[in-house]
Image (cartoon, rainbow, N blue to C red):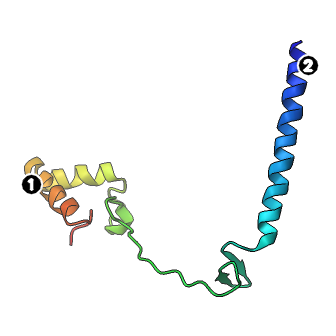
């Protein structure tokens, strides 16, 4: 009985995968989504799509390479410990509160 149950499950699983594959193939062929043509990003009609945004690198995350700590602290925890050693616990706490309140984790 268990073997028959497994076979039924596998048949259903394979059928579902086949249907999903066929469905995704139909979607891909319809061209209604954003995709690339050559070196451009285009919409579903083939017209160029211009994406705009900003890079929030170092936003709420401190990383050593962004602070130019060559050979020094690199992880967020290491940098927090370093700032605490340099400023003392109270000033370091105030420093991080100020940085995070301004929307940046890097000193501005």
The residue positioned 85% from the left and 56% from the top of the image is: 22
Q: Please say if 97 is above or below 32.
A: above
Residue 2 placement, left or right of 104: right
**Element at badge 1?**
helix
Residue 67: image x %, image y %? 31, 67
Quarter of the rendering containing residue 5: top right
Q: Residue furthest left?
A: 90
Compare marks 1 and 2 and give the one earlier in the sequence.
2
Quarter of the rendering containing residue 4: top right
**Element at badge 2?**
helix
Residue 28: image x %, image y %? 78, 67
Q: Which residue lies furthest to the bottom in this view?
A: 47
Q: Which residue has dot 1 on it?
A: 91
The residue positioned 90% from the left and 25% from the top of the image is: 7
Quadrant for the N terminus, please: top right
Residue 15: image x %, image y %? 87, 41
Badge 2: how crowded within 10 Å, few (<14), some, or many (20+)?
few
The residue positioned 86% from the left and 48% from the top of the image is: 18
Q: Please say if 7 is above or below 82.
A: above
Instruction: Report the front residue among 12 and 64.
Output: 12
Quadrant for the C terminus, please: bottom left
Quarter of the rendering containing residue 45: bottom right
Q: Which residue has dot 2 on it?
A: 4
Query: Which disc, if any, is residue 10?
Result: none
Q: Residue furthest top?
A: 1
Q: How far apart are marks 1 and 2 (CA)?
A: 69 Å
Badge 1: how crowded within 10 Å, few (<14), some, or many (20+)?
few
Instruction: Report the front residue among 6 and 44.
Output: 44
Residue 86 placement, left or right of 52: left
Q: Please say if 28 is above or below 2.
A: below
């Amino acid at each position: 009985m268990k073997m028959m149950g497994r076979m039924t499950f596998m048949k259903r699983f394979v059928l579902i995968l086949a249907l999903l594959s066929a469905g995704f193939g139909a979607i891909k062929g319809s061209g209604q989504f954003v995709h690339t043509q050559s070196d451009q990003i285009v919409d579903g009609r083939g017209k160029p799509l211009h994406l705009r945004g900003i890079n929030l690198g170092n936003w709420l995350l401190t990383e050593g390479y962004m602070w130019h700590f060559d050979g020094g602290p690199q992880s967020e925890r290491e940098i927090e410990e370093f700032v605490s050693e340099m400023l003392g616990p109270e000033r370091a706490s105030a420093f991080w509160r100020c940085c995070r309140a301004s929307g940046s984790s890097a000193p501005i």
